[in-house]
């Protein structure tokens, strides 16, 4: 599991070996982030999508022990989303982009559009699909 304590810029992670009945001590990851979603692909890659910085995807190929440097896929002002695998190692990443403040001539819906990207996991990382 990945968590972010309210005043920590870093993500934290901990593991359970008994389907979530108990958890070990949380430790810092190697990357910052907020509002994460996490999935494991059919090939076993763990993918974490999160905001800050930008909207970024991180990959782990060893059950979360190590993470890549991350791939920023967008620069929304504020976002939270969901990621699904639509075919082996192909993901659809949907996220809301919300603009803070008063933006003239924009409706509430226009200030919070739903954005979607399709990406592929390769041996070298994330690429557009």
Image (cartoon, rainbow, N blue to C red):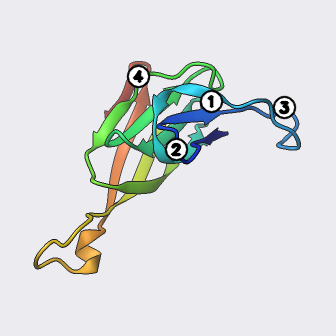
- Proximity of marks 4 and 2: CB atoms separated by less than 8 Å: no
Which circle marks residue 7 in the picture? 2
Pointer 1 local density, CA inside 10 Å: few below 14, some 14–19, many at least 20: few
Residue 63 rendering spot, x and y as whole percentages = 66, 25
From the image, tell me which residue sits under label 3. Answer: 17
| Secondary structure category for the residue under label 4 | loop
Q: Earlier in the sequence, mark 2 or mark 3?
A: 2
* Picture quarter with the C terminus: top left
Q: Residue at x 23, y 68 (%)?
A: 101
Label 2 – label 3 distance at C-alpha? 28 Å
Q: Earlier in the sequence, mark 3 or mark 4?
A: 3
Q: Earlier in the sequence, mark 1 or mark 2?
A: 2
Extreme left residue here?
105
Which circle marks residue 36 in the picture? none
| Secondary structure category for the residue under label 1 | loop
Label 1 – label 3 distance at C-alpha? 17 Å
In the image, 81: left or right of 71? right
102 vs 50: above or below: below
| Residue closer to the observer: 84 or 37 | 37
107 vs 119: above or below: below
Which circle marks residue 44 in the picture? 1
Q: Earlier in the sequence, mark 4 or mark 2?
A: 2
Q: Is residue 88 visible?
A: no
From the image, tell me which residue sits under label 4. Answer: 69
Residue 27 rendering spot, x and y as whole percentages = 65, 27
Q: Earlier in the sequence, mark 4 or mark 1?
A: 1
């Amino acid at each position: 599991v990945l968590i972010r304590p309210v005043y920590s810029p870093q993500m934290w992670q901990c593991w359970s070996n008994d389907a979530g009945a108990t958890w070990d001590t949380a430790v810092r990851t190697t990357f910052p982030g907020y509002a994460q979603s996490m999935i494991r692909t059919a090939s076993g890659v763990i993918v974490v999508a999160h905001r800050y910085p930008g909207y970024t995807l991180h990959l782990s190929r060893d059950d979360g022990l190590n993470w890549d440097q991350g791939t920023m896929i967008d620069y929304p002002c504020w976002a939270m989303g969901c990621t699904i695998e639509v075919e082996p190692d192909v993901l659809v990443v949907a996220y809301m982009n919300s603009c803070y403040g008063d933006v003239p001539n924009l409706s509430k819906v226009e200030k919070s559009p739903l954005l979607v990207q399709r990406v592929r996991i390769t041996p070298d990382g994330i690429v557009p699909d």
